[in-house]
Amino acid sequence: MAHSTIKSLEKHLPDGLVVNRAWLLDRGFKRPLVDYYLRSGALVSVARGAYRRPGPPLKWEHIVYSLQELGYDIHVGGRSALELQGFAHYLSMQGVKLIELYGVDKLPGWVSQLEAPYQFILCKPRLFDEPTPEAVTTKPFGHWDWLLRYATPELALLELVAEIKQDADFERVDKLFDSAVSLRPQLIMDLLKACKSVKAKRLFLWFADRHRFAWFEHLEVDAVDLGSGKRVIVKGGSFNKRYQITVPRALASERADGFEQPFL
């Protein structure tokens, strides 16, 4: 009996997947049976209310896929998504790895209780009423080929500029734009037209204009609603007349279109 019930658990719960009691109950594992699994060691608790089968240490990818499997509408975004796609090798920091997740769902409490060399940051920029489907793609992970949802470079950069608050943020994002050689102008236009954040749209276009990759020439900037009025992104910065924003003076440059001037 015990052998058959453990075989049933192994059949339904893959190695590395973290689930809660509700997930187990939905698959026919009643509370007494789950308690038996925990007593016998067939299930182990990774944090309060979260369980897995015994196995090697969990990678952050296991946690992200587990959250997706549990129904959380999230994706790996921002700098973490760019790292997955080779943009940010030189920005990785020693110590605890920070994984940026984007979505509107609040993460379960057990995620912050994990004892692991990584931590998750939930970002809720609310950039869109309806997301652009092509802006989120998937990447297979592990021997199960679990599909992790993550932002394309176009979306990840837009997510990052939406979070800019100070000079140091500008410098980090500017380094990432150095690698943005092959972005897709049509996807960028779809994102900019759907984006609700005037700040994010103006900043994205300012960085794109600053780097002047070939794809920038294919953008229909006049078709993007950039709102009205000036936006002070950083105090004491230089004012960009084209995009009506302040930017750090260290990144300001003289351009033929009357680019930056001191903002008083």
Image (cartoon, rainbow, N blue to C red):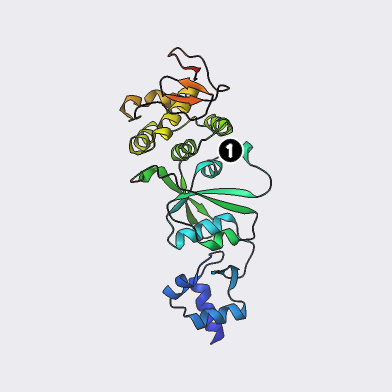
The vertical placement of 202 against 52, above or below, is above
Where's residue 26, x and y in %? 42, 73
Q: Is residue 241 left or right of residue 41?
A: left
Residue at the (46%, 28%) spot, across then down: 232
Asked whether residue 184 appears in the rendered view, the answer is no
Residue at the (48%, 35%) spot, across then down: 161
Where's residue 214, x and y in %? 44, 24
Q: Nearer the viewer, residue 68 or 7?
A: 68
Question: Residue 168 occupies which quadrant of the picture?
Answer: top right
Question: Residue 240 occupies which quadrant of the picture?
Answer: top left
Q: Residues within 10 Å of mark 1 (few under 14, many from 20)?
A: some
Q: Nearer the viewer, residue 182 or 194?
A: 194
SS at circle 1: loop
Residue at the (64%, 64%) spot, across then down: 56
Where's residue 52, x and y in %? 56, 69
The vertical placement of 189 against 64, above or below, is above
Q: Is residue 151 left or right of residue 116?
A: left
Q: Residue furthest front?
A: 264
**Disc 1: which residue:** 88
Where's residue 124, x and y in %? 45, 47
The vertical placement of 5 against 52, above or below, is below
Three-letter amino acid code at the position of disc 1: Ala
Q: Residue furthest right?
A: 94
Q: Residue furthest top?
A: 256
Asked whether residue 245 appears in the rendered view, the answer is yes
Q: Residue furthest left?
A: 223
Count up the numbered dots.
Answer: 1
